[in-house]
Image (tube, rainbow, N blue to C red):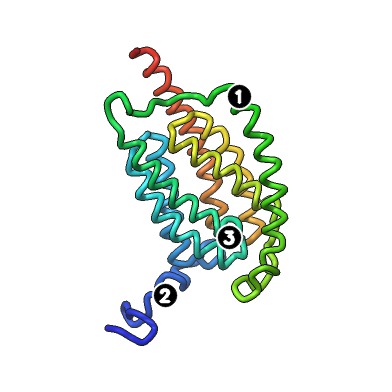
Amino acid sequence: METKHGRVFLGMEWQEVFFSTWFEWMGYPVSGLEFIGSIAGLVGVYLAAKSNILTWPVGIVNVVCFFFVFYTARLYSDMLLQFYYFSVSIIGWVNWNKSGEQKLKHEWIGQQWRFRLPLITIVATLGIGYLIEHLHILFPSVLHEPADLPYLDTLIGVLSIQATFLQARKKIDCWVIWIVTDALCTGVYWKKGIHLVSLEFLLFTMLAIFGLMQWLQKHREELAGK
């Protein structure tokens, strides 16, 4: 059945199905997008910890859902970050699918990059944070209100970009960055009132610790197998 606005599902337009409240958790209304995105995110991180290539397609479901969740919460840098996540998910999917001599191994990044990454983080956070702070002025027709917590939100974004890129290359350092990032997200999203997402990132923090342990074990096994 069709309407001029879109397809109807069980008496509701598809937009209403996903944006409407599916249930309440501790008095907090959970939308369909938030619920589906949260489940996909948890499954995706667990698969990543186990080095399972299915982490990437499952992660794409999470990316699409949270693009709209973050738009609603006015976390614009997180919203824009989903475009990057989508691209890196495709790259990671391709990289992890390599075999033979091209197959990626679980490794640490080089010593030089361990000094460069903190500097990049500071510069990028200040520069992009300033832009995000004024984004509603540049695009008033789309973004009607100023971003909330622009610099902290940007720091989370910068760290997430680094972690996702390193994860796509199977660099063990990605889990160290994810632990810090997910812990920050837990506090920020709780403050913003996105309680289910906050709880999810608390679980992400624990999964990141699990992922670090798993990849360290695989790293040792690969070294022993040389």
Q: Residue furthest front?
A: 138
What is the three-letter code of the residue carrying label 2? Gln
Which quarter shows the C terminus? top left
Q: How many marks?
A: 3
Q: Residue at x 30, y 84 (%)?
A: 2
Q: Nearer the viewer, residue 210 or 96?
A: 96
Q: CA distance from mark 3 to mark 1?
A: 38 Å
In the rendered image, which quarter is residue 184 located in? Answer: top right
In the rendered image, which quarter is residue 215 located in? Answer: top left
Tell me where residue 60 appears, x and y as whole percent. 40, 53
**Crowding at label 3, few (<14), some or many (≥20) Cα neighbours within 10 Å?**
some
Q: Residue furthest bottom?
A: 4
Q: CA distance from mark 2 to mark 1?
A: 48 Å
- Discs 3/2, front: 2
- Residue 112 circle label: 1
Location of mark 3 (residue): 194
Q: Is residue 31 above or below residue 184?
A: below
Q: Residue at x 37, y 34 (%)?
A: 51
Tell me where residue 22 appears, x and y as whole percent. 44, 69
Which quarter shows the N terminus? bottom left
What is the three-letter code of the residue carrying label 3? Ile
Location of mark 2 (residue): 15
Q: Is residue 5 above or below residue 121?
A: below
